[in-house]
Image (tube, rainbow, N blue to C red):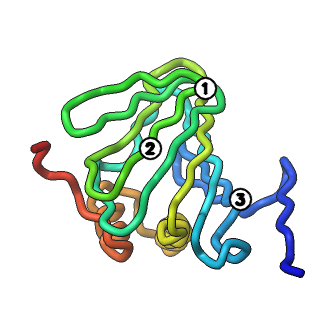
Amino acid sequence: MNEVSVIGPDDGETIALGAIRMRILEDGSTTEHRLGMGEITIAPHTDGPPQHRHAQHDEGFYVVSGSVRFTVGERDYDAAAGTLVMIPPGAPHTFANPGDQPAVLLNTFTPDLYVQYFRDLRDMIAGGQPLTPEATIAVMSRYATVPAIDHA
């Protein structure tokens, strides 16, 4: 029988990235790397990463609480709790919390390719390098992800 993973509300690997916190719920080890999953908490008035495109994985965001602004190309979507946003490979996207309350997202990666990205950012910060857009883009490039320079 395969091992079942049960992650309680106080479990999981938590990674602090400035005003954003990622709690890794599934790093792919239980799913043979078909799925990675995390819980993202975004402080009020916080921008997310530079707008980018993934080449090799789908990314899903389910808004658990608060409200999140997703930018896809040049279009903004304000997503309240209960909203699901699915990003296929190649779609330019980013997110932010422009509101006054924290926001919580359930984040999925299929396959789990992008989970290690968050660990790499944590290690970069621990090594003394600041979390700048340029540094974030450099880490993204390790995971078939590029900046969305144009919005076409």
Q: Residues within 10 Å of mark 3 (few under 14, many from 20)?
A: many
Counting residues from the start of the chain, the first of labels 3 and 2 encountered is 3
Residue 23 in the image: x percent, y percent? 67, 54
Relative to 16, say whether 42 is above or below. Answer: above
Q: Secondary structure at mark 2?
A: strand
Characterize the local packing of mark 2: few (<14), some (14-19) or many (20 or more) Cα atoms within 10 angstroms. few
Please tell me in which quadrant of the rendered image residue 119 appears: bottom right
Location of residue 34 (image quadrant): bottom right
The mark closer to the camera, 3 or 1, is 1
| Amino acid at pointer 1 | Gly
- Residue 25 is tagged as 3
Residue displayed at 65% across by 48% down: 39
Disc 3 and disc 1: Cα gap in Å? 19 Å
Residue in view at x 86 percent, y 76 percent = 3
C-alpha separation, residue under disc 2 versus residue under disc 1: 13 Å
- Say the numbered circle drawn on residue 86: 2
